[in-house]
Amino acid sequence: MGTNGKKSMNVKAKYGALATVALVLIAGFQYLAMLELPQYHDVMKYLYFIPIILAAYFLGWKGGILCALVASFISSLHLILHSSVFYLEYLLQSLMFALGGGLLGLLSDRDRQKRLIIEQSKIDFLKALSRSLDARDTYTEGHSNRVAAIAGEIGKNAGLTNDEVNNVYEAGLMHDIGKIGIPDSILRKEGTLDLHEFEIIKSHTVIGGEILSYVELLRQLVPAIRHHHERYDGSGYPDQLVGEEIPPVARILSIADAFDAMTSQRTYNRRKSFEDAVKEIEKKAGTQFDPRFVDSLRKSFNKLKNIALENTSIDVECKPVR
């Protein structure tokens, strides 16, 4: 089972446990009401819809129905213990609970599926856009896709949540979007850039942030795009942020960007081995890069090596998880 599958199972177990705790607590309240406030006893059974709703929303229609049947049984224990004629009332209550749990579960499943389709469509669009940008320069073809995959792996090894890893991956795909505003004469220049040209190329971080700020679905990526060339010691650009002032996603992207640049053949630098690239980044931990994420890079080494060997598109496990 993949990482996402395990996390999905953990989420289900967590909310299953939460629904169980709610069932036990409500059963306790119902028992106390039966002893101290019998006039409220029948009203108490409607509280069982709280765990039913929890189970239906987070576990789907099967979880909703299962929780409903358990809730109906627990809420009817007093009838089982004190009455010989309870079957009709019990069956009607079980049917009402099960219908509620099942319908709520179906609605939540449908809503969840719709969100996943939207998220996957967004990822596909970002991949297509990043490939069209990379195609402007044959030496950086596939760069954005590799940076996204590398950054996602670093994020996973750093203990980020699924949502955070998705955010890192999407930011990786879009980190160079601002280069759309850089002239080809500078972007594809062979050899060293002069100071004026370098200032123009540096502006791609600001341009990229401005472009994405107009797109509601991508606005959360703006800080990472704007600041992925900041340095941990404050000597980066565009805003000379220091240490923790730099958004975490931007700190991860700067490492992924550097790793791919060093391990790819470019006109302006010699390709390094994967091990040498990691050592070079480790030397700059605390100055250019965040030491925490440099450690995550080392932990991800074997997976990153496989990613870096890819020259074109990559399918990675950093896909929408909800």
Image: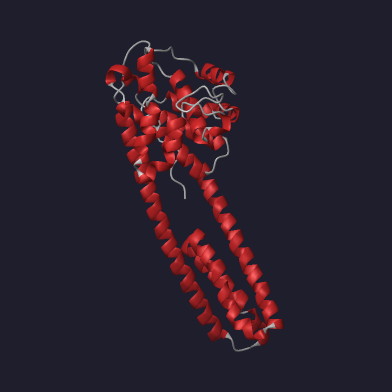
Of the pair 4 and 235, the residue shown nearer to us: 235
Give the image location of residue 44, x and y in percent: 60, 78
Examine the rendered structure and indicate whether residue 124 appears above or below residue 233.
below
Quadrant assignment, res 70:
bottom right
Which residue shows up at 47% across the image and 37% down it? 168
- Looking at the image, residue 193 sits to the left or right of residue 44; the answer is left
Quarter of the image holding residue 232? Answer: top right
- Residue 201 versus residue 32: which sits nearer the camera? 201
Residue at 56%, 18% (x, y): give it.
279
Q: Measured from the top left, where is residue 172 in percent x and y?
A: 43, 33
Q: What scheme was used to colour the molecule?
A: secondary structure
Regarding residue 76, the answer to whether it shows in the image is yes
The image shows residue 198, relative to residue 41, as above or below, that is: above
Q: Position of residue 96 (x, y in %)?
A: 49, 77
Residue at screen point 61% across, 64% down: 20
Note whether 34 is above or below 322 in the view shown: below
Residue 104 percent location from the top left of the image: 45, 67
